[in-house]
Image (cartoon, rainbow, N blue to C red):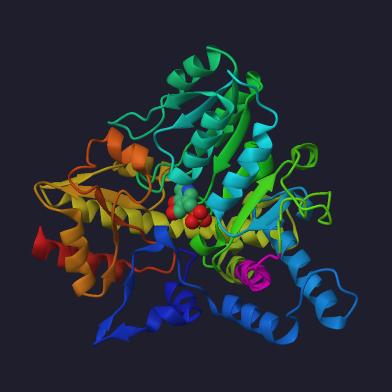
Amino acid sequence: MAIQVNTIREQFPALSLADEGKPRIYLDNPGGTQVPRQVLNRMENYLIQTNANHAGVFRTSVESDKVLQEAHQGMAELLNARNADEIVFGANMTTLTFAVSRSIGRLLNRGDTILLTHMDHEGNVGPWMHLARDLGLKVKWLKFNLKTYEYDLNELAELLSEGNVRLAAINYASNCLGTVNDVKTITEMAHQSDTIVFVDAVQYVPHGPADVQNLGCDFLVCSPYKFFGPHQGVLWGKYELLQKLESYKVRPADNAPPGKYETGTQSHEGQAGTLGVIEYLEWLGESMGKEYQDNFKEFSGRRKNLHAAMQAIQEYEQILSERLISGLQMFPDVQIAGISNKKDFSRRVPTVSFTVKNKNPQKIAQKLADENIFVWHGHNYALEAIRLMGVEDSGGVIRIGPVHYNTIQEIDRTLEVLGTCL
Ligand SMILES: Cc1ncc(COP(=O)(O)O)c(C=O)c1O
């Protein structure tokens, strides 16, 4: 195994904290992750050395613009975008999606259809529902199978064949079920009917190598704070589309991407911190990802290291998934809402949601919180999935979400505490 978890944990100051003698166990990661030193250093340096607004001729502004450009370049490499101008920073995924959905809406006409899914987080549902209401669009819904927790691609083909689907908003990995979807195939299917494909990759990017050119989709969004960075959002779009769409911008702002979508003054320290994550992952790829580098022969330099790092992470996390899921399966009253057969773990991230017969999810999360174990409960904004599974009225699910800095010991401790309250 490539990941040396103790060395990884040393990079994250928050991971060594304890309260009243109880170490913190962060399994709330699908809601937001902790940050390594590289992020803290970049943010502190930015605010001390180069804090200024954009496009001045003086030293701090020139230096600041260099940092912002480097952050765009770093994200382009992480997502394997063609170039840095395809990367748009913003406050978070939801805000970026609301904004760009308005621009995409300018291509659509009353009566056109858009396709949404019951697996998506509200961030990739709400903006499109508003657009549909404002423009008089029809909405079609793709369900997931309640036994496999995956989309049925035959159903997708049927929905697409009914015609006039101008946009499909789908997710790469579900923040509730943990399912990783076959975005490449879905995109190929959608493109046959000239459907624009908008991918929410917020829950995928922290867990595996992402490659927008290989996926072939048109837009992809993610959130650095879910992959060890500061509170930021990132939108990638094909350059031609970003160029062609009209953005909602003020007159003096850039007319070219990405500036035409980056409205107002950005969080410069947030972009600097995102560059810090890229540097952290580059270090991880260099020091622990050697054996994966040959899988990315077409890449070189930092791009290669970043993808190797994400593959090392992916492999380590499968061990965590296995321990967590097999541990949960020992409790007879637990029902896992997601793929739970080990042979299919390559099609899931380690985010595991479950319900417990006749037990309230909030109460179980509270029992864990009492032991300084942090997990989420409720609908976690995956409203459609929670409703389709019929668990909204009983308080939703309990969600345990490890990432690569979590340990087997932390999983075991969590299962031990669960054992006392199930
Ligand atoms: C799958 C998914 N999409 C979108 C979002 C929204 O992200 P943001 O907080 O950056 O708007 C989340 C946040 O949890 C998510 O898990």
Q: Is residue 298 visible?
A: no
In the rendered image, the residue lying farthest to the top is 162
Compared with residue 191, is residue 104 higher up or lower down, i.e. above or below? below
Q: Which secondary structure dominates the residues rendered in magenta? A: helix
In the rendered image of this protein, does residue 260 appear above or below residue 55? above
- Total numbered labels placed on residues in the image: 0
What residue is drawn where x is 64% and y is 19%? 192
The residue sitting at 69% across, 87% down in the picture is 48
Position of 349 with respect to 265 (left or right) is left
State yes or no: residue 277 in magenta. Answer: yes
Q: Quadrant of residue 229?
A: bottom right
Taking the spot 54% from the left edge, 55% from the top edge, the residue there is 311
Q: Which residues are magenta?
A: 265-279
Q: Is residue 275 visible?
A: yes
Quarter of the figure that contains the C terminus: bottom left
Between 159 and 154, the one nearer to me in the picture: 159
Viewer-proximal residue, 348 or 399?
399
- Where is residue 417? Give x, y as percent: 16, 67
Q: Does residue 53 sit above or below 112 in this rendering?
A: below
User: Which residue is rendered at x = 68% and y = 70% of the image?
Assistant: 268
Q: Quadrant of residue 113?
A: top right
Q: Where is residue 275 shown, x and y percent of the image?
A: 66, 69
| Image position of 34 (left or right of 380) | right
